[in-house]
Image (cartoon, rainbow, N blue to C red):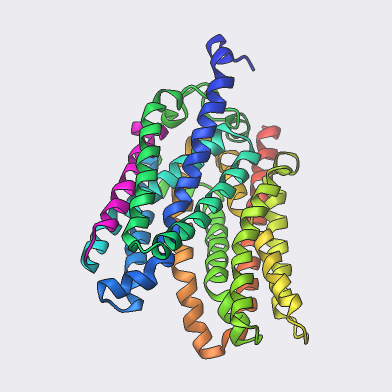
Amino acid sequence: MVIPPDRKAVCPAVYSLLLAIIYIAFISLGLPDSLIGAGWPAMHSDLGVPVAFAGIITMIIASGTILSSLASERATRRFGTGLVTAVSVALTASALVGFSVSGSFWMLCLWAIPYGLGAGAVDAALNNYVALHYAARHMNWLHSFWGLGASISPFIMSHALASGHEWSSAYWTVGLIQAVLTFALLVTLPLWGRVHPVAARDAQAASGQGSEHEPIERAGGHVPLLQALRIPGVVLILTAFFAYCALESTSILWASTYLVADRGVAPATAAAFASLYLLGITAGRFLAGFVADRIGDRLLIRGGFAIVGLGAVMLALPVPTDAIALAGLVVAGLGSAPIYPAIIHSTPVNFGRRNSQAIIGIQMAAAYTGSTLAPPLFGAISTWTGLWILPLFLLVLVALGLLLSERLNRLVRAQAASVEVA
């Protein structure tokens, strides 16, 4: 492989500078995600609405996120990853500032629309860009930085409320951070097309498509939704991704309640260990980054699901001590860590770089759908069966994700073997 002279000169510096911007962007992606949950106890009281109305806001945001994820492929091909990312972050910034000046519930609903539209497009565009241009370790570390951002925003909200300010000041602060990032993204727009697509080499080898030096966003034409869904293996990975995000969101929402109601754990202890599930994901992604390039995405996915399964079994064991169940929650968090980044990073290799943006957009939609639907579904099931069923619910999702991801691996190997024979 011969790298053009201009790329030889510019790539190292541009690679590092743009990677730093992307790391900051992933922190910024996580910041808004936990603001509503952290601030809603004060928000609903000030706005004079029931606690349950938080679900309306989150459903509007989720709907916008799913729609923009599905539209991200067309937008990215037309305008490029850099501009789509900058505009999406600007949308999120405007929505957060809009939240900060909202004095009624209907205004929150209105601002929730750009809130969701910005989140979905930037998530799909950035994940595809990283999958194509950077090694697997960066995908894991970047998603660890997302967890850092999601962990910071509750502290911003807590500080705002504890210091006598209203919840709106937390939204204003995070909105200002997003606005600064928007400016940085606009300044660095010329860099996005100058990073050599190192990850695309593997994708090209797997798909046999396109020139290695063809601009990623414009390689080939638009891939319609139905055409992407007909690509062999896409439905398998979408369902596996749905299963993973369903088990993650269900664990986050219901683990503490399960520990208290079914295992008799003290509420304070249960809350602490429920937070350790999220910290386990963040720490696990950081640690996975050190081995991701050596062991590969497939093993990370396989091992991740297996470890989550072990954690779910530990949660369910009928032993007199709570220590095993509490440890099981931490183990499940560590196992969850590499699955999401590895599924995204393997997309260009499994389906070809021409198709990766379309498929990652659909994957994001599947992820948000699983995260939105699974927790209330479990809530409905548990009203009939009891909360004891949580470990079993998680094990079913683990089995579904593992089975379908392994079927995809066999399909990809069979396709590669047929290409070699031909």
Decide: is 84 above or below 392. Answer: above
Residue drawn at point x = 73 percent, y = 81 percent: 322
Vertical arrangement, residue 369 with respect to residue 207, above or below:
below
Q: Which residues are magenta?
A: 75-103
In the rendered image, residue 137, in percent from the top left (x then y), is placed at 65, 40
Could you tell me residue 71's position as x and y percent? 35, 46
* Farthest top residue in view: 5
Query: How many labels were placed on the picture?
Result: 0
Does residue 66 belong to the magenta stretch?
no
Residue 120 is situated, as x and y percent measured from the top left of the image, at 40, 50
As rendered, which of 240 and 283 lies closer to the eye?
283
Q: Does residue 58 lie above or below 351 as drawn?
A: below
Residue situated furthest front in the rendering: 163
Residue sitting nearer the eye, 152 or 56: 152
Residue drawn at (53%, 30%) of the image: 209
Which residue corresponds to the image point at 53% horizontal and 33% vertical from the top-left? 20
Asked if residue 340 can be seen in this view, the reply is yes
Residue 101 against residue 292 in the figure, above or below: below
| Residue 80 shows in this picture | no
| Quarter of the image that includes the N terminus | top right
Q: Horizontal and vertical percent for residue 187?
A: 38, 27
The dominant secondary structure in magenta is: helix
Which quarter of the rendering shows the C terminus?
A: top right
Task: Decide if residue 8 is on the left or right side of residue 18.
Answer: right
Q: Judge left or right: residue 45 versus residue 4.
A: left
